[in-house]
Image (cartoon, rainbow, N blue to C red):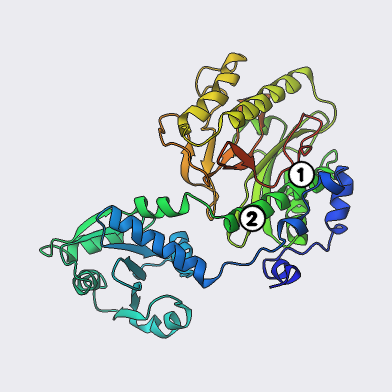
Amino acid sequence: MRRRGFIISSGLSLAAFGGLAGISSALDISGNDSLQIDELTRGLKALAPEDYVKRQEKAKQLMEQNGIDGLLLTGGTNMSYFLDMSWWRSERFFGAILNTKGDPVWICPAFEEKRAREMIQFGSDIRTWEENESPYKLVACIMKDLGAPRGKLAIGPTVRNFVVEGIQADGKGRKLRLADGSVITNGCRGIKTKKELKFMDVANRITKLSYAEGFRHLKEGMSSADLAKIISETHSSLGAKGGSYPQFGTISAFPHGSKEDPPLREGDIVLNDGGCSVQGYRSDVTRTVIFGKPSDRQKRVFDIVLKAQQEAFKAIRPGVTAESVDAVARKVIEDAGFGPGYKYFAHRLGHGIGMDGHEYPYLVGGNKLKLEPGMTFSNEPGIYIYGEFGVRIEDCFVVTEDGARYLGGMTTRSIDDPFGAT
């Protein structure tokens, strides 16, 4: 597929707002200083069937390593990730069992079979159940047919409880053992491929460009909805469905917002968090800017948060623990007088990101997981002072062989230069 074809198919239109050049001009970035979206998508193709086959093969390897005979997936991100299948979640059980013996085996309401066959791309064995029958008996039957009637069935971590209870109830006496499937799903999704990272680079770049365009339109008296609308429209003009959640003034001290929604006033902090999706892969970016001239206190807090982000980034490399990176950022903030612990820096440093905005693994105290190349996280320290303001700076990164790299570039240099470093 030609680049233009890929851009169109993934929705990366550069038409409105003068396209990328117009936004780049507003940012005063151009030429070699700007990672053009056109360059980011050069040679990049959409996900193909072979990409999903590789994921399934890796899942099978993890199953064999962990003594697991099958992995049950239901509608949601994990089914999309492994099987390129989007199916709504309802009270009716629909799912698939990945297994080490062959193709996935599907469980489907009988009246949905024809539609399911239109959509299913991997596997042709579909076991159906009528409305007056229990679907859960099919699980034990499938495992028996796979030669593992007393085997271990891993349950995907987002499978709902009523499904698990149904399997347990209909599995009594059959000795089917249920296990946590996150060792497989996390083991596959936690490490991103080069293609996945490209999608995330583009998504993060689009979000940052959209924020920059939105901040150009800040004006006295505007509402947070006004700013959110501009940012959403800019995402759309660049072809990605995305948005943001602006917080003005004292409301910026609420990490995830408040029911209060004051209009923008001179000297207010503007804290904006949000993201978009490209080919199913997410961005997550937060920028804090000042509408007008920053006060000394605003500038000091901002500089502390920026230093915390920068020091945490320097500490990232393969082999260090997730909790140690969180600790680096937290020490900067505590040493500056905004501690102890979670008093002002009220949340973990970062979360994993990929097809879900928040996913395994997490940069948080107590997590001794060692970082590996290909893992992707947010790096988002913050200081929140109720009654005054809050500051958070967030960029997503990938762990590399010798450190880390920010996705989408345009990282913050100072309170006056929120998108300076490409």
| Badge 1 amino acid | Ser
The residue depicted at 48 percent of the width and 38 percent of the height is 371
In the image, is residue 139 above or below residue 128?
above
| Residue where numbered disc 1 is placed | 223
Give the structural element (helix, strand or loop) at label 1. Answer: loop
How far apart, in angstroms, are the residues tagged by discs 2 and 1?
34 Å
The residue depicted at 24 percent of the width and 69 percent of the height is 139
Quarter of the image where one finds residue 416: top right
Quadrant where the image shows the N terminus? bottom right
Q: Earlier in the sequence, mark 2 or mark 1?
A: 2
- Name the spot of residue 188 as percent of width and height, x first: 43, 54
Viewer-nearest residue: 103 or 292: 103
Viewer-nearest residue: 90 or 151: 151
Would you say 255 lies left or right of 225 here? left
- Name the spot of residue 383 as percent of width and height, x first: 62, 26
The residue depicted at 58 percent of the width and 55 percent of the height is 194
Give the structural element (helix, strand or loop) at label 2. Answer: helix
Quadrant where the image shows the C terminus? top right
In the image, is residue 353 above or below residue 315?
below
Task: Let me know if residue 22 appears in the view.
Answer: yes
| Residue where numbered disc 2 is placed | 198
Q: Are marks 2 and 1 in contact (CB under 8 Å)?
A: no
Label 1: few (<14), some or many (≥20) within 10 Å? some
- Name the spot of residue 156 as percent of width and height, x first: 35, 57
